[in-house]
C-alpha cells in the first residue's frame, strides 16, 4: 500500500511558498522596473564631464618652436550638460512608475494566489490523511474479512452465487474507494511539493 503513496519532499512550511520560482521571477521584475524608474529620474540630473589629455609633439610646433619627444603638453576640459526640456522625461518617469506599480501588483497577486493554493492543498492533504487512516485501519481489513467470509460461505454452500457476488463487489468497492483516496492524497502531495519547491 505504501508503494502507491507519494511523499512530501520537505517539511510542510508555508514560508517556502515565498521562495517559489514564480514569485522570485516577479520579484526580479519589480527590481528591474524600479531600476528603470531610477534611470529615467537620473536623466533629469545635470551631466558633468571631465577630460584630460597628455601628449607630446616632435618637431616644429604652431609657435615655430622646435620640440623634442621629452616635451609634454597637457590639457583639461570640464563640461556641464543641463537638461532644458524635462517635460518628456517627466512623462517617461511617470510611465516607468506605472510599470513599477504593475510589477508590484503582479507580485502581490501571484503571492496571494500561491498562498491560497497552498492553504487549499494543505487542507486537502490533511483530509486525505484522515481518509487514509480510516481505510488502512478499518475499511481495508473489513474488505479482507468480507472476501474471506464470502469465499468460505460460498464454498460451504451457505450462500448462493448471487450473494457471494454482491459481497465480493462490496469488498472491491471498498478497495476501489481506497485507491481513490490514495490518488487524492497523491494529488495533494504533488501540489504541496510544487508550491514549496525552490527549483
Image (spheres, helix red, strand yellow):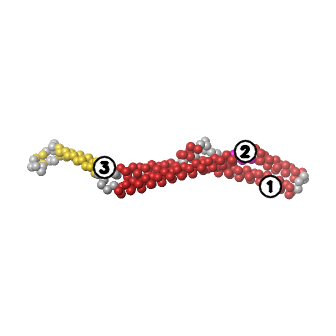
Image location of residue 100, percent across then percent down? 45, 52
Along the viewing direction, whichever of 157 and 105 lies nearer the viewer: 105
Q: Are marks 1 and 3 in contact (CB under 8 Å)?
A: no
Q: Nearer the viewer, mark 1 or mark 3?
A: 3
Q: Which residues are magenta?
A: 129-136
Q: Which residue is mark 1?
A: 169
Q: Residue at x 65, y 47 (%)?
A: 123
Mark 1: secondary structure? helix
Residue appearing at x 12%, y 49% in the figure = 61
Would you identify the image quadrant in which residue 92 lies?
A: bottom left
Residue bearing the label numbered 2: 133
Cα–Cα gap, marks 3 and 2: 72 Å
Q: Position of residue 158 (x, y in %)?
A: 90, 52
Main secondary structure type of the part rendered in magenta: helix
| Residue wearing tag 3 | 46
Disc 3 element:
loop
**Does 131 lie within the magenta span?**
yes
Residue at the right extreme of this rendering: 157
Q: Nearer the viewer, mark 3 or mark 2?
A: 3
In the picture, measured across the screen, residue 3 lies left or right of residue 148, that is: left
Element class at badge 2 = helix
Q: In 3D space, how far apart are the residues under numbered discs 1 and 3 (Cα atoms)?
A: 85 Å
Name the residue: 39% across, 49% down: 38
Left/right of residue 120 with respect to residue 24 in the rendered view: right
Q: Residues within 10 Å of mark 1 (few under 14, many from 20)?
A: some
Amino acid at each position: 500500500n505504501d508503494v502507491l503513496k507519494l511523499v512530501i519532499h520537505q517539511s510542510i512550511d508555508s514560508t517556502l511558498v515565498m521562495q517559489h520560482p514564480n514569485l522570485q521571477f516577479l520579484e526580479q521584475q519589480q527590481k528591474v522596473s524600479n531600476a528603470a524608474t531610477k534611470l529615467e529620474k537620473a536623466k533629469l540630473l545635470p551631466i558633468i564631464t571631465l577630460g584630460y589629455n597628455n601628449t607630446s609633439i616632435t618637431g616644429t610646433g604652431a609657435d615655430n618652436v622646435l620640440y623634442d619627444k621629452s616635451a609634454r603638453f597637457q590639457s583639461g576640459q570640464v563640461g556641464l550638460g543641463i537638461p532644458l526640456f524635462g517635460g518628456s522625461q517627466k512623462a517617461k518617469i511617470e510611465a516607468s512608475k506605472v510599470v513599477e506599480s504593475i510589477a508590484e501588483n503582479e507580485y502581490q497577486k501571484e503571492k496571494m494566489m500561491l498562498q491560497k493554493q497552498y492553504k487549499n492543498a494543505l487542507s486537502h492533504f490533511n483530509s486525505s490523511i484522515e481518509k487514509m487512516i480510516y481505510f488502512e485501519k478499518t475499511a481495508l481489513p473489513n474488505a479482507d474479512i468480507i472476501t474471506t467470509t464470502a469465499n468460505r460461505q460460498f464454498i460451504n454452500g451457505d450462500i448462493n452465487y448471487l450473494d457471494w457476488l454482491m459481497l465480493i463487489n462490496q469488498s472491491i468497492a471498498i478497495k476501489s474507494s481506497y485507491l481513490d483516496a490514495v490518488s487524492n492524497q497523491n494529488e495533494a502531495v504533488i501540489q504541496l511539493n510544487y508550491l514549496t519547491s525552490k527549483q
